[in-house]
Amino acid sequence: MVLLQDRGKAPTTPRPHPCLNFIVVAGSLALTFVLLAHSWFPDVAGFGLIVDSGLIWLGALIPVLGVLAIAARRKHLAVAVLVPAVIWSLLFVPGLLPLAWSAPPGSANSLTVVSQNLKAQSGTAAQSAKSLAATGAQVVALQEIDGAAQGPVTAELQQHYGYSYRIGTVGLWSSYPILNAQPQGLGLGWNRALSADLDTPGGLVRIYVIHAASARPSDHAERDTMLANLSDTIAADPSKRIIAVGDFNAASTDRHFSALTNLLSEPAQDQGLAGFTWPATPFPVTRLDHILQRGLSATSNSVLTSGASDHLAIRTSFNL
């Protein structure tokens, strides 16, 4: 009896498209390079500013590369995708973890600061001031207080705070005495920042309230000047406890912001994630408003809506 062999063709695995291999490997290498060396990119036509500001969002490309690696059916491509995934995680995940996981309990000597860019001509500056005072903060820092808003904001906050200092469109209100208050031109020739000492029950706390100049892809030189001069000022400041708060018009990953984060630290958010503050609607995509500190322990840090500003407000509490 003769057995007949099955002459049919054995099923074959579809060959992966060679373009997928190249796309995944090249994409992974390019993404890794951008994550690690974005500050080296020349800022031509605002390209550097755009890359710096959107750096955290490049993580969205990692799942795309992962899907392409699966489609390519090559195990080594998973390793290629893993490299930018690890780099992105090391850069951003620690700052995305909830502060509530590691924050110390609040102490009797504590300080809560709220801050917001009110947005000139928003028409709701007094409403913002009222809601910020209602948070129970001992300190309110405001930016972009236009001429029409100065009277209503002052009238609202003086009901809650016994001390204040305002220069230009930047203001500070406090439950504690304000000492040594002075404007900070920071190299611009006009004042968009101030500094003062807060005489708290736990001792003096130096505070800087900043409204950095606008940053647009084609024009951010004045903002860069302010940030550089602020870094120099804080580096020379002998104060043991410092808070720098306001609208810095710079994302946390901006190359011109890094000099500040080398001197001061920013706490994570209470519930995690990045704490984006701008634009307030339809949804924020970057964090331009910051609170940086030295010599203090943050117990809480969050963002909140206040008025009709295009910036969300920030609220942070510290143990003194």
Image (cartoon, rainbow, N blue to C red):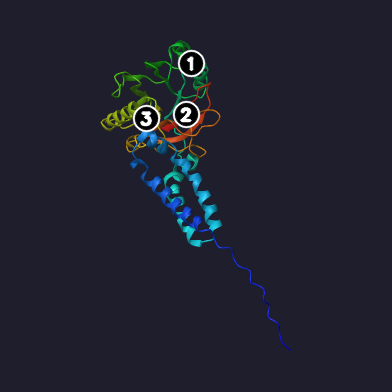
Which mark is first along the chain, 2 or 1? 1
Q: Rounded to the nearest whole Å, what is the CA distance between mark 2 and mark 3?
A: 13 Å
Q: Is residue 76 above or below residue 90?
A: below
Give the number of the disc on residue 314: 2
**How far across and down, in percent of the image, does residue 202 sit?**
37, 28
> Are the residues tagged 1 and 2 within 8 Å (C-beta)?
no
Q: Classify mark 3: helix, strand or loop.
A: strand
Q: Where is residue 70 in the image (x, y as percent from the top left)?
A: 55, 57
Image coords of residue 226 (percent x, y)? 32, 27
Quadrant that contains the C terminus = top left
* Image disc number at residue 243: 3
Cα–Cα gap, marks 1 and 2:
20 Å
Question: Which residue is identified by label 1?
Answer: 121
Give above or below for 54 relative to 23. above
Lateral position of residue 265 relative to residue 274, left or right: left
For the residues labelled 1 and 3, the Cα–Cα distance comes to 28 Å
What kind of residue is marked 2?
Ile
Q: Residue at x 45, y 35 (%)?
A: 299
Q: What element carries label 1?
A: loop
Q: Mark 1, mark 3: which one is toward the viewer?
A: 1
